[in-house]
Amino acid sequence: ASEEKPTKQITRDMMKMTRQINDELLNSIENLGGEDGKATVNCTTCHRGQVVPALRME
């Protein structure tokens, strides 16, 4: 599989974005999360089983 495929770079960028949301943004909000006190987002937060996530909430 070619490393030149644009979708591979998009995936890498989205993984970085997810890591940044979890590590920097969500961790800065006090009292957010479940019993372990840690809220997280992952791929399914936006994609919901679809290859391309919805661009608008409906």
Image: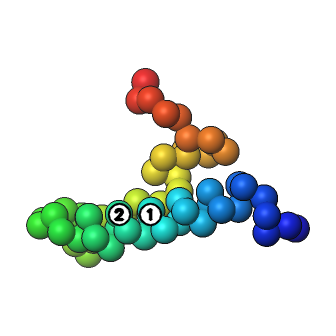
Way the structure is coloured:
rainbow
Vertical order, 35 against 45 (above or below): below
- Which image quadrant is residue 48 in? top right
**Where is mark 1, residue-wise?**
18
Residue 37, image x and y in percent? 22, 72
Spatial separation of the CA atoms under disc 2 and disc 1: 5 Å
Residue 38, image x and y in percent? 27, 71
Residue 35 visible in this rendered orientation of the protein: no
Which residue is at 79% across, 64% downward?
A: 4
Which residue is at 62% across, 45% downward?
A: 49
User: Residue 32's mark?
Assistant: none
Vertical order, 19 against 50 (above or below): below
Residue 3, image x and y in percent? 79, 69
Which residue is at 37% across, 68% downward?
A: 20
Which residue is at 26% across, 64% downward?
A: 25
**Where is mark 2, residue-wise?**
21
